[in-house]
Every structure is written in C-alpha cells, then in structure tokens.
C-alpha cells in the first residue's frame, strides 16, 4: 500500500492520515506549553515527588512522594504499615483512623505532607500481640469483632476516646465513636469493650 500520491495523482487514505499525525506532532512540539502555575514559586511544592519526613510511632520516616498522596496511601503503600484500612476513602467509615498528636483523624482524607511535623500513631504503635493496650484486651474479652476489617480503626479511635473520657458510660462511648462504622454490626460488644477500657483507664476496672 502506498503512502504517497497514487497513480491518479491523489493520496491514499493511509498516507493522508499519516500526514495529519506527523503534522500534529510537529505543531505540538513547536507550540510552547503554558508554564505550570507555581513553577517559579519556591513556596509551592510538587507536583512531582518531594522529600517528606513523617514521625510515625516515635520513628522518623523519610520518603519521596507527590504532594497529592494521602497519609493512608503513604502508610500502606510506601511504609508497609497496613493496619489502617482503606474502605470508603472519603471520610465516612473510620477504617483508616490514625492519631495525629493524639487526636483521631481519617488518614484517607489527610495529605501526607499535611502530617509533617505531627506525631502520627497507627494501630501498629498502640499495642503488640504480647503487650496489648486496655482497649485491645477489652475487645478480646467481649469478642467485639467479626470480620475484623473495621477493628484497627475502632481500636485507634477508642484508645483516643478512653484517654480523654475515663469511666465513660456506654451512651458516651456510642456518641464518642460515632465516626466509625462496622458493617458486621458488632456494636454491642464494642460498646461494652470500650466502656470497660474506659474504666480500666481510670483504674476502677
Ligand atoms: S477509609 Fe477513611 S474514613 Fe473510610
Ligand atoms: S467486624 Fe466486620 S466490619 Fe466491623
């Protein structure tokens, strides 16, 4: 098949399309791109990877990430801290809860760069299999889980709650943990567990 003029002096369809393609590329190369906004502003970081240091569970972790990366994705995909779970990815379910300076936050809607300079605590930093905290012990005692997918987020949120609300009643626990959802519906056991842990926090268990 010819790409040039045919025997009748015309152009084949393939040659015509190829000509258009080459012309488009050429004009694209010649057309200057508009400079990215902020390219000359030293106060704007990115959009490529930038160095970020996160203090997680007492340890400084250095990584290079794009500024658009969420704290949850940085934890799970770059630092192998997979305790925080991605479920809704839109600040609804609480499965991704971590502590920022002791306060529970949804790590799916916080940029990793925003967490720089703060103390980040994940479920991995809250207790270990051989050294469970009061909330974890109470969850086991009350059999407060089924599939367990929501559990890390509940453990983190509950730990922050009992620290601030020692001896909370089940009603206060229910209100305090309203930002976490369990699709298996193990709320009854969790309420008892967190109320127990709150008492233990106050030293009256
Ligand atoms: S995954 Fe973050 S709130 Fe649901
Ligand atoms: S135990 Fe399954 S989602 Fe909560």
Image (tube, grey):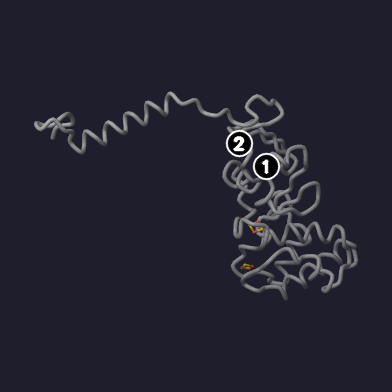
Q: Position of residue 199 (x, y in %)?
A: 86, 67
Numbered disc 2: secondary structure: strand
Could you tell whether 129 is left or right of 164 in the image?
A: left
178 horizontally vs 165: left or right: left
Q: Which residue is mark 1?
A: 112
What residue appears at the point 57 percent right and 45 percent down from the top-left corner?
77
Q: Quadrant of residue 67?
A: top right
Q: Position of residue 135 (x, y in %)?
A: 76, 62
Q: What residue appears at the point 75 percent right and 41 percent down from the top-left corner?
A: 58
First in sequence, mark 1 or 2: give its number.
2
Q: In this orientation, which residue lies closer to the viewer: 121 or 40? A: 40
**Do residues under tags 1 and 2 come within 8 Å of each other at their CB atoms?**
yes
Q: Residue at x 72, y 29 (%)?
A: 43
Ligand number 2: quarter of image = bottom right
Residue 188 is situated, as x and y percent measured from the top left of the image, at: 72, 76
Circle 2 sits on which residue?
65
Farthest bottom residue in view: 188
Which quadrant holds the N terminus? top left
- Dot 1 alpha-carbon crowd within 10 angstroms: few under 14, some 14 to 19, many 20 or more: many
Task: Tell me where residue 97 appears, x and y as whole percent.
Answer: 70, 55
Quarter of the image for residue 38 reads top right
Q: CA distance from mark 1 to mark 2?
A: 9 Å
Locate residue 18: give its quadrant. Answer: top left
Q: Nearer the viewer, residue 28 or 201?
A: 28
């Amino acid at each position: 098949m010819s790409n040039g003029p045919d025997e009748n002096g015309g152009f084949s369809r393939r040659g015509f399309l190829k000509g258009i393609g080459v012309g488009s590329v050429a004009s694209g190369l010649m057309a200057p791109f508009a400079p990215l906004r902020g390219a000359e502003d030293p106060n704007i970081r990115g959009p490529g990877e930038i160095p970020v240091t996160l203090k997680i569970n007492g340890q400084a972790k250095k990584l290079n990430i794009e500024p658009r990366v969420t704290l949850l994705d940085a934890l799970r995909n770059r630092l192998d801290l997979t305790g925080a779970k991605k479920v809704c990815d839109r600040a609804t379910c609480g499965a991704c809860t971590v502590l920022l300076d002791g306060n529970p936050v949804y790590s799916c809607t916080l940029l990793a760069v925003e967490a720089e300079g703060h103390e980040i605590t994940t479920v991995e930093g809250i207790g270990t299999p051989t050294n469970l905290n009061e909330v974890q012990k109470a969850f086991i005692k009350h059999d407060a889980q089924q599939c367990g997918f929501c559990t890390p987020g509940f453990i983190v949120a509950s730990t922050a709650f009992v620290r601030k609300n020692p001896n909370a009643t089940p009603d206060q626990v229910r209100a305090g943990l309203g930002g976490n959802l369990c699709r298996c519906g193990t709320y009854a056991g969790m309420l008892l567990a967190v109320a127990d842990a709150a008492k233990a926090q106050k030293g009256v268990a």
